[in-house]
Amino acid sequence: MDTEPSAAAADGAPQSVHDLVLSGGRVIDPETGLDAVRHIAVDDGRIVAIAEEPLRAQRVVDVTGRVVAPGFIDLHSHALTPTSMRLQALDGVTTALELEAGAPWLEGAYRDAALDGRPINYGYSASWAAARMSVMDDLDPRTLTTQLTARMGGRSWGAPGTPDDVRRILDRLEAELELGALGIGVLIGYAPDASHREYLDVARLAARYGVPTYTHARHKNSSEPGTALQGIQEIVAVGLGTGAHMHLCHINSTSLQQIDVVTELVGNARAHGVQVTTEAYPYGASMTAIGAPFLHPDNLPRLGITPSHIVHTPTGERPATASRLMQLRVQDPGAPAIIQYLDESRADEQNLLRRALLFDDTMIASDAMPLQSGDGKPLTGTEWPPPSDAVTHPRSTGTFARTLRVYVRETGLLTLPEVIRRATLLPARVLERACPDARRKGRVQPGADADLVVFDPLTVHDRSTYEHPTRPSDGFQHVLVGGEFVVRDGEIDLDATPGRSLRGARG
């Protein structure tokens, strides 16, 4: 409820009149540990005061009975169109970053987002995959902006590189870092034949620039050869050898049956000073291009799945045989597919997923996927509401609400302040060395950006399902980006485009 400015302080002294006050909410700041009823004043897009007593403002919004927290920072989103970002805003996200795959053409990605406007903040890493495709297949990075996923199933770009190839790949990555990339996204799981030496050289480059690598590990199998443990061992060893910050993407779907030994390895590495951070999403199924190398029929037994665990989303088909899966992979290797790695209806497999999310300091990140039409074609990214037959993964729209519902309200496995910390402060700290602006994110403090979420922890919940993946989450009453309402009273403001870029210090 909006009200007029209050007259004066309780002692009669004059007060400043702020642009906006959020009044009477339960304010949770994960850095200072504040968890109390407070009044928050916002001027020029930043928090300027947090007080126990009411504050004056041109607009006062009563948020009594609601939690006020930093907006969620999603380190892993492949869905940075306006439509997808509105769905993410309705899930409490105020910053969505494409860091695992990166931007094929960094300058163009930042330019287009700024020109078109975005409802929430955005940013990109340099794309190792795109750099490799440019060098190995002689492709213009500008053409890869719309073709990166479609080319993921190809083999030529993932072939071992010569020393000259690797030098040219590194040169392209360094040029992107000079333009402000937030690190280097390394999809080595899609090019497992790339040399260990090349990955080491990529991490050395990241260490020299003081930015993270965001890695999809080389392997995820449960049995030899190429186990999940071996994939994580490589990441840890490279971090130890280079001093680079190694960010491990989606530890849940990377580790699968080996989650316990993987988390033990990562925990011990951290104890010895290796900087390895992790993230996860609260779903047992994944989504990627059906032509991904690890989905080759010969590899599925080592993953513990069969062809029928894979859903070809454009048609809904579950291939019954290895030959049919191969046919789909050849016909359209970039077609999106849902892969049911863990059956959440089974207690033992649900517990595997939970151990991934409960591992120390595991951040919440969605791995959001772009929206596609029912026949598998990319949508333009401006439709609202999204078409009812649009295809994506439910994690694209429900990750943060689902985490709050399941891990806080239903099971009590995590406290509310802890989930907020994992969704806000920890991601901000991953970015801070590379991006000074991130020091103003993930916090509710004077001087911080007014990227805020207001929600009822007793009712917030996800509505998206595998059958209906574009249903937005419910319960986020207000979402503000830079002090501007993007979600107001649970509804998207289609005219609000306050999102701003996060760029590396060199940009």
Image: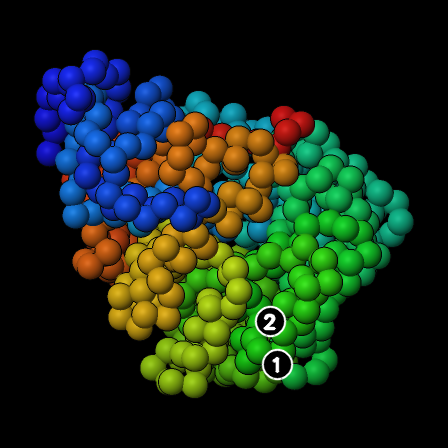
Residue 276: % across, % down: 65, 58
Residue 263: which disc?
A: 2
Is residue 258 among what the camera can see?
yes
Is residue 494 among what the camera can see?
no
Q: Give the image's coloring scheme.
A: rainbow
Say what amino acid the circle numbered 2 marks.
Thr
Q: Residue at x 77, y 51 (%)?
A: 243
Residue 74: which disc?
A: none
Q: Residue at x 79, y 47 (%)?
A: 204
Labels 1, 2: front one: 2
Q: Image quarter for residue 140? A: top right
Residue 174: % across, % down: 74, 36
Say what amino acid the circle numbered 1 marks.
Ser
Relative to 43, say whether 154 is above or below: below
Disc 1 designates what residue?
222
408 to the left or right of 312? left
Q: Image quarter for residue 232? A: bottom right
Q: In the rendered view of the protein, which quadrant contains the C terminus? A: top right
Q: Disc 1 to disc 2, how far (Cα)? A: 15 Å
Task: Tell me if mark 2 has few (under 14), some (14-19) or many (20+) residues whose alpha carbon lies within 10 angstroms of its own.
Answer: many
Relative to 430, say whether 336 is above or below: below
Q: Residue at x 82, y 56 (%)?
A: 241
Relative to 428, say whether 149 is above or below: below
- Label 2 sits on a secondary structure element that is helix
Q: In the rendered view of the protein, which quadrant contains the N terminus? A: top left
408 to the left or right of 237? left
Q: Image quarter for residue 134? A: top right
- Choose the circle earlier in sequence order: 1 or 2: 1
Q: Nearer the viewer, residue 298 or 197?
A: 197
- Label 1 sits on a secondary structure element that is loop
Residue 371: % across, % down: 38, 50
